[in-house]
Image (spheres, helix red, strand yellow):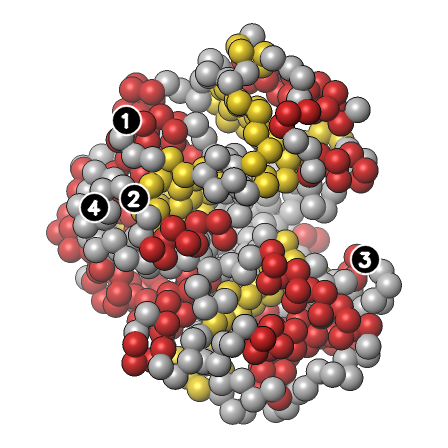
Amino acid sequence: MTDRAGTPAQASDLIDVHALVRAYYELKPDAADASQRVAFGTSGHRGSSLKTSFNDDHIAATTQAIVEYRTAQGVTGPLFIGADTHALSAPAMTTALEVLVGNKVRVLVDEFDDYVPTPALSHAILLWNNNPATRAEGEADGIVVTPSHNPPSDGGFKYNPPHGGPADSDATGWIAKRANELIAGGLHEVLRAEPSAVEQYDFRSRYVEDLENIIDMAAIKRSGIHIGADPLGGASVGYWGAIRDHYGLNLTVVNPAVDPQWGFMTLDWDGKIRMDPSSPSAMASVLAHQHDYDILTGNDADADRHGIVTPDGGLMNPNHFLAVAIDYLYTHRSGWRADAAIGKTLVSSSMIDRVAAALGRRLWEVPVGFKWFVPGLVDGSVGFGGEESAGASFLRFDGTVWTTDKDGILLCLLAAEIRAVTGKSPSELYAGLVAKHGDPVYERVDAAATPAQKLALGRLDGDAITATTLAGEPITAKLSRAPGNDAAIGGVKVVSENAWFAARPSGTEDVYKIYAESFLGEDHLRQVQAEARLIVDAALG
């Protein structure tokens, strides 16, 4: 961690917006250079125009590939498209619109030329497809132009098919392959036209007015609690004021500024500007106001992540808030199916496992990536799906789907509902869970790995691990596939009674990530982390 973490950004930290946008149009990717090819991670294609990894050619080719993919899948309805506040998002959206219109795709953009949060776009797709009248015009899908919480120099491009959530690896693999073929072919097969033939859609009003069907907005209003909402310069900036006005809440938009340089941010742990609402360093300026509000919240640039700040506990660890949210929701949502499972990624805290057991609910553990929760949220068999990185969504009061992508605005409002209904802060409620279930210590660290070792780790079978104990306890599980859906986890997870670790290769660096947790204290966690390296290194040879 740099000693500048948590300090205000300085002029030398800020991007040159004009240079960034100029590079978007001027630099042309080399199709033979792997670093300059279209590559979809768990949340779309991301890169920077300055590194020739996110440029006009990339977006034109990717949009053309999406058009061809949706046609092959029989998707004939409108395509919803929206963008966040990153500097590269506006030019990328213009490129995408040119290609969509050039291919005669029916396109719906925001009616007020506003930024569009990821959850609002997912919500729009599902509203369209779940309404027989609109669905008769053809199934809808969407594109979100965002690199999420990434630094200001980055751009991102994400496809959401008709189920409303992140596209699966089959879809993104096909789209990326086709996009790279188009770039290698000089974009001769890409159709473009002036982006004039587009329709308008009121993302904000439809999302805001529907919130009363998933959050007890009346209880929040009655309580009079003072809510502070900081958009961190992101796409939710116009939504929080609309929520306040529509429901008559005692809510202050803490910082309504939008700045593509994000000059008002404090630096993250590594000295970079990163709009991560779960990071104490990135949220330092927000934390300065923690005693001014009953609930204080933050969102990242596309509002799919949440940060929860309480007067008594400061910024909550994302795992802690997920546990509180689950415990509250499954005791306050009588309209959900009695067998609705609790969804978690396998690197989320085992506190969730213990909360699920106490509630008598089935735990549904899946690999990293919100896309795995989509089927369960759609059919109501999963009431809540959450990731350790502060992303989650859940069902409406009646047990039907809300969004199939992460919704940071929703989780912030849930924190307000919890405070209004229980009279306690989420931090206080987590202390109660600790008293019942123990106090876990959780951390993610990195370990060096060669590209060959990373490839081997991604394919490692749990049976290849020969260790029988972990930090003094018998190993109870060695997983290379997720218990919830039997999908490959792209690494391994080793579990004992009071601890676990998971190891997964990094997609961008020569390291592998070790997630670890212990219910026996920090010293035991360090022992788990040390043994995790030895166990993984031995398995890799």
Crowd around label 4: few <14 · some 14–19 · many ≥20 (10 Å)? some
Residue 81: image x %, image y %? 50, 74
Residue found at x 82% / y 72%: 184
Residue at which label 2 appears: 340
Task: Tell me how far mark 1 sits from mark 2, CA to CA.
Answer: 15 Å
In the picture as drawn, the residue positioned furthest to the top comes out as: 472
Tell me which amino acid carries mark 4: Arg
Please identify the quadrant where the N terminus is shown: top right
Tell me which amino acid carries mark 2: Ala
Residue at which label 1 appears: 358
Residue found at x 59% / y 69%: 89
Q: Nearer the viewer, mark 1 or mark 3?
A: 1
Question: Based on the displayed image, in which of its 4 quarters is residue 341 positioned?
Answer: top left
Residue at which label 4 appears: 333
Query: Would residue 228 appear left or right of 221 to someone viewing this image?
Result: right
Question: Based on the displayed image, in which of its 4 quarters is residue 268 positioned?
Answer: top right
SS for dot 3: helix
